[in-house]
């Protein structure tokens, strides 16, 4: 981990808006993030690929007006920040991923609750699909609170190596208030083949095996904490076992977390459909905003 990356202000953001109340929350949140004095916020609204006839001109006029109003709100909340509004065309999630890549955005900010079509209810919302396919870290906003983040929690699982955990901690530190001094690192341990082992091992043997797995995770967590401490970042490690989705949400509620930061393992297609996504489930059920980071080598070819 590079010490200079910790607390480094954000310089380039992309905020997607569909002009819904949820998108307005995302805009307000973007303005409260630790931004560089020369930061640029790209404010993007996606229009259908093909519009024409008598509705084209009124639709464009209305979208332009709403986009200008949204840009004015950012300028009011964060004076001096450069805001670049843009109307683009295409499938919403693909257009946002493409724009983030082309503008070298460090973060995409989206509202969790927006305007949902029937297709989105079946295939996932635009926000969920941006998180699923985007290479850039995403901040999914659901809270109406506009104060800077002060109680972040990073969640990891046994599949996360030290490099990935460092990346998550770095993201949490960059999104949190510069005077925030607390960061909780939650390690979620799952017993391999837990359901099957419950039936094949005796109760005492199973409990002993589960405690052994938890002890191994705790030892790993201590190594991670020591490594982060060596870089001047003080964190509190917490080890819990169980379904990662349930554990993460439960601990976030219990500890009044205002920001959850977690990664994904890049599953797509059939693997994603069969295994589901912890990140997407947490996004839908978390009591706070959620930041999600993809593996460093993930790449999506937008249509």
Image (cartoon, rainbow, N blue to C red):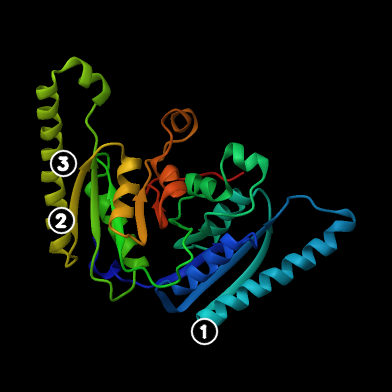
Is there CB contact under 8 Å for labels 3 and 2? Answer: no
Q: Quadrant of residue 159?
A: top left
Query: Horizontal and vertical percent for residue 112?
Result: 52, 54
First reached walking from the N terminus: tag 1 or tag 3: 1
Query: Horizontal and vertical percent for residue 183?
Result: 25, 62
Q: What SS does tag 1 mark? A: loop
First reached walking from the N terminus: tag 2 or tag 1: 1
Residue highlighted by disc 2: 225
Residue highlighted by disc 3: 217
Residue at 89% over, 54% down: 53
Quarter of the figure with the N terminus: bottom left
Other residues around mark 1 within 10 Å, as few (<14) / some (14–19) / many (≥20): few
Q: What SS does tag 2 mark? A: helix
Residue at 32% over, 60% down: 256
Question: Would you place residue 125 above or below residue 136 in this image?
Answer: above
| Mark identifier at residue 79 | 1
């Amino acid at each position: 981990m590079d010490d200079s990356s910790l607390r480094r202000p954000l310089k380039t953001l992309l905020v997607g808006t569909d002009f819904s109340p949820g998108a307005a929350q995302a805009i307000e949140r973007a303005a409260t993030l630790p931004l560089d004095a020369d930061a640029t916020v790209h404010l993007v609204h996606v229009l259908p690929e093909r519009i024409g006839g008598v509705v084209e001109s009124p639709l464009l006029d209305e979208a332009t007006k709403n986009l200008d109003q949204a840009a004015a709100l950012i300028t009011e909340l964060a004076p001096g920040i450069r805001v670049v509004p843009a109307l683009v065309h295409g499938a919403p999630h693909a257009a946002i991923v493409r724009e983030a890549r082309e503008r070298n955005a460090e973060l995409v900010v989206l509202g969790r609750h927006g305007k949902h079509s029937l297709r989105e209810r079946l295939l996932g919302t635009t926000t969920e699909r941006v998180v699923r396919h985007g290479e850039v870290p995403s901040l999914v906003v659901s809270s109406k609170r506009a104060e800077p983040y002060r109680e972040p929690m990073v969640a990891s699982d046994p599949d996360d190596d030290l490099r990935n955990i460092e990346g998550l901690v770095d993201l949490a530190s960059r999104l949190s208030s510069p005077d925030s001094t607390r960061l909780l690192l939650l390690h979620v341990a799952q017993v391999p083949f837990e359901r099957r082992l419950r039936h094949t091992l005796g109760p005492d043997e199973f409990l002993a095996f589960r405690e052994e797995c938890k002890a191994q995770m705790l030892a790993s967590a201590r190594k991670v904490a020591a490594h982060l401490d060596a870089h001047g970042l003080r964190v509190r490690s917490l080890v819990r076992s169980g379904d990662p989705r349930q554990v993460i949400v439960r601990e976030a509620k219990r500890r009044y977390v205002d920001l959850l930061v977690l990664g994904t393992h890049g599953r797509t297609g059939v693997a994603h459909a069969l295994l589901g996504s912890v990140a997407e489930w947490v996004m839908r059920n978390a009591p706070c905003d959620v930041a999600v980071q993809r593996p460093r080598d993930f790449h999506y070819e937008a249509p």
